[in-house]
Image: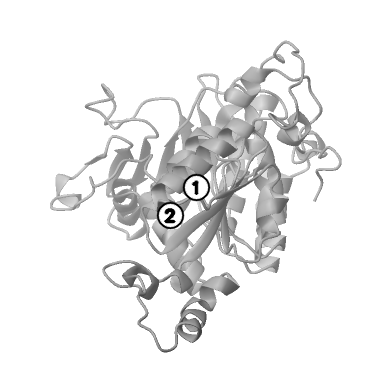
Amino acid sequence: MKTKTTRRNFLKTTTVAAIGMPTLIPASALGKNGSVAPSNRIVVGGIGLGPRGRKVLAGFFAHKDCQFVAIADVQKERREIIKRLADREYGNSDCVIYDDMSGVLERDDIDSVIIATGDRWHTTASIKAARAGKDIYCEKPCAMNIMECQQLDDTIKKHKRVFQAGTQRRSVPNFKLAAHLAKSGKLGQVTSVHAGILQLQNYLEPLPAEPEPDPSVINWDKWLGPSPRMEFNAAYCRGRWRNHAGLYAAWRLPEWGSHTIDLCQWAADADGTTPIEFEAESDGMITAQYANGAKLVMRLSGFEGEGDWQEGLGTCPIRFEGDEGWVEAGDAKKIVASNPKLIKNEKYDQITGTDPVMHVRDFLDCVKTREQPVCNSTAVRYGHMACFAAAISWKLGRKVTFDPKKERFVDDAEANRMRTYKRRKPYTI
């Protein structure tokens, strides 16, 4: 792990300076009393941490073998909020603020970064971080289109970085149990996997133009980044960017699909592939089929455990079916199965689907071991491509055929044009 020179030499220089007199060294500097010595901590910086980013940051604070030291954000208010949180957590005033991500990426003492910007920046920021030698925890969806899925994974592999997508449900016990039942054969041969999704809809009209703020308060050009140029409206910067063209990924499907379709890919042992056919139905459902004949069903409702949120599965429901049974799970710490014996005596209710603590733990462990996290860049590549292919089928209003090896639609120039977009200069990669 990279560490600050002053931290590496702390004990040595203290000893030299104090020859002939008693030296009092805090137990925390030696890693005693349950603390972690500074030289063994993973040093973390943040890029674009808004409300969701603050939730993820709390997940990092929960682990004492990492230390958050810097925040970069183009919004003054948000970077100052993060500094206050970090300084309060560590009881000091050491967190450094930057108005550009380069401030974090150029620091040799920072090992890893949390990226929780809006969708438009996820791939570009991740690629820049990988090139800077940082390991990456990136919120989802991690890409804006199929091309970015490819570029992200290729860059992570090239630079041998550890990458964890913020699809935290892979680390939540009830979802892990459901996937285990499917992957272990306890449901028999998997015949279909079902993902709860949002109703897809066309992009919203742009918000009314407002005067641009001083760049020291909100740097609007940097906020937009690789997205097409558009007029400023303060509501965008307060979260109203969702479902606007250029700011939001593929007509709402990746927003939910990066949770639930991702879990279906995992349960179907499809982290290295995608379905080969996608077709949107008139009722909002989208069906897809893998090469082995199993189906991926993206649906708005129809789950066995549905009901009142407090009593049913909760948000982000999934269902895995085999020829010998089925299982469902959702965010409300719930799991139901066709045979109660499948889940009898299993512990699965410790945390909810929105809690990132255990997912962050998986990331930190992999930073140390250099192993692949549970939702690495390759899992993102194919899981996100499945989302985009399904969304393109919906947008075109017809069936599309996709080749997961060539990563192209088959004999379909119209669909293939929708695999990519042009980044605005100078925010290219």
Q: Residue furthest bottom?
A: 20
Q: Position of residue 49 (x, y in %)?
A: 55, 40
Q: Earlier in the sequence, mark 1 or mark 2?
A: 1
Residue type pointed to by label 1: Gly
Residue located 43% across and 54% down the image: 360
**Residue at x-position 47% and y-position 30%:** 197
Residue 115 lies, with reference to residue 422, above or below; the image says: below
Q: Nearer the viewer, residue 235 or 110?
A: 110
Percent coordinates x, y for residue 186 in the rendering = 27, 56
Q: Is residue 119 left or right of residue 365?
A: right
Residue 259 x, y percent position in the rendering:
47, 41
Residue tagged by mark 1? 166
- The correct choice, above or below, for 70 with respect to 117 in the image is below
Which is nearer the eye, 269 or 218?
218
**Residue placed at 32% from the left, 61% from the top?**
184
Mark toward the viewer: 1 or 2? 2
Q: Amino acid at mark 2?
A: Val
Say if residue 129 shows up in the picture. yes
Residue 17 lies, in percent from the top left, at 50, 82
The residue that mark 2 highlights is 360
Q: Secondary structure at mark 2?
A: helix
Within-10-Å neighbours for mark 2: few <14, some 14–19, many 20+:
many
Foreground pick, 188 / 93: 93
Mark 1: few, some, or many residues within 10 Å (few <14, many ≥20)?
A: many
Say if residue 267 shows up in the picture: no
Q: Residue at x 53, y 31 (%)?
A: 286
Secondary structure of residue under mark 1:
loop
Q: Quadrant of the N terminus?
A: bottom right
Q: Is residue 150 found left or right of 89 in the rendered image?
A: right
Cα distance between the residues tagged 1 and 2: 8 Å
Check whether the beta carbons of the residues at disc 1 and disc 2 lie within 8 A of each other. Answer: no
The mark total stands at: 2
